[in-house]
Image (cartoon, grey):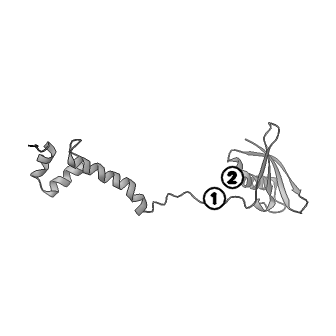
């Protein structure tokens, strides 16, 4: 004859209130039926709740450049980044500090945030598109 475990003997003489209290304080030994119920409930909570609740933990949508950015090396001195003028939010006639900040923000999605803009110039291709050519380093 199979004898009931100590946990089963404990729970047999108690009401639902006492059983819930023992679940809350986790008084059951490992390998016991009630211990397995507790572990199952915890695992269900971990794996089911993300599908039922919106925790709002999606990454923010960061608008990237609307045109391609070309990056090339500067002979070991840094990077030369070519970015479309429409991706740079610098007003015409702005001071150098404003242009430098706008260029840094425009190339940041490609180079990362630890980049220093040394100098820049505007260029125009054969089709008449205007670009900024930016020399930068980390």
Q: Quadrant of the N terminus?
A: top left
Q: Residue furthest front?
A: 1
* Closer-to-camera residue (127/54): 127
Name which residue lies at 42% across and 58% down: 50
Q: Indicate left or right for 17 with 118 as reference.
A: left
Neighbor class of circle 1 (other Cα within 10 Å; few <14, some 14-19, many 20+) is few
Q: Are marks 2 and 1 in contact (CB under 8 Å)?
A: yes
* Closer-to-camera residue (74/6): 6
Neighbor class of circle 2 (other Cα within 10 Å; few <14, some 14-19, many 20+) is some
Q: Quadrant of the C terminus?
A: top right
Tag 1 or tag 2, which sits nearer the N-term? 1
Q: Quadrant of residue 103?
A: bottom right
Name which residue lies at 11% across and 46% down: 9
In the rendered image, residue 108, in percent from the top left (x then y), is placed at: 70, 51
In the rendered image, residue 131, in percent from the top left (x then y), is placed at: 83, 57
- Looking at the rendered structure, which numbered label has been put on residue 102? none
Mark 2 to mark 1 CA distance (whole Å): 9 Å
- Looking at the rendered structure, which numbered label has been put on residue 62? 1
Name which residue lies at 66% across and 60% down: 63
| Vertical comparison of 80 with 55: above or below | above
Q: Residue furthest top?
A: 76
- Secondary element type, mark 2: helix
Can you identify the residue that label 2 sits on? 109
Q: Residue furthest right?
A: 126
Query: What number of labels is visible?
Result: 2
In the rendered image, residue 130, in percent from the top left (x then y), is placed at: 85, 60
- Secondary element type, mark 1: loop
């Amino acid at each position: 004859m199979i004898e009931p475990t100590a946990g089963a003997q404990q729970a047999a003489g108690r009401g639902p209130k006492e059983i819930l209290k023992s679940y809350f304080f986790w008084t059951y030994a490992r390998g016991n039926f009630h211990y397995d119920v507790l572990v199952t409930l915890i695992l269900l909570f971990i794996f089911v709740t993300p599908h039922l609740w919106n925790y709002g933990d999606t990454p923010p949508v960061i608008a990237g450049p609307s045109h391609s950015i070309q990056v090339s090396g500067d002979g070991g001195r840094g990077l030369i980044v070519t970015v479309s003028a429409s991706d740079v939010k610098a007003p015409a006639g702005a001071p150098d500090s404003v242009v430098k900040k706008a260029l840094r923000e425009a190339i940041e999605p490609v180079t990362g945030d630890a980049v220093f803009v040394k100098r820049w110039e505007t260029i125009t291709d054969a089709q008449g598109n205007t670009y900024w050519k930016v020399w930068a380093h980390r």
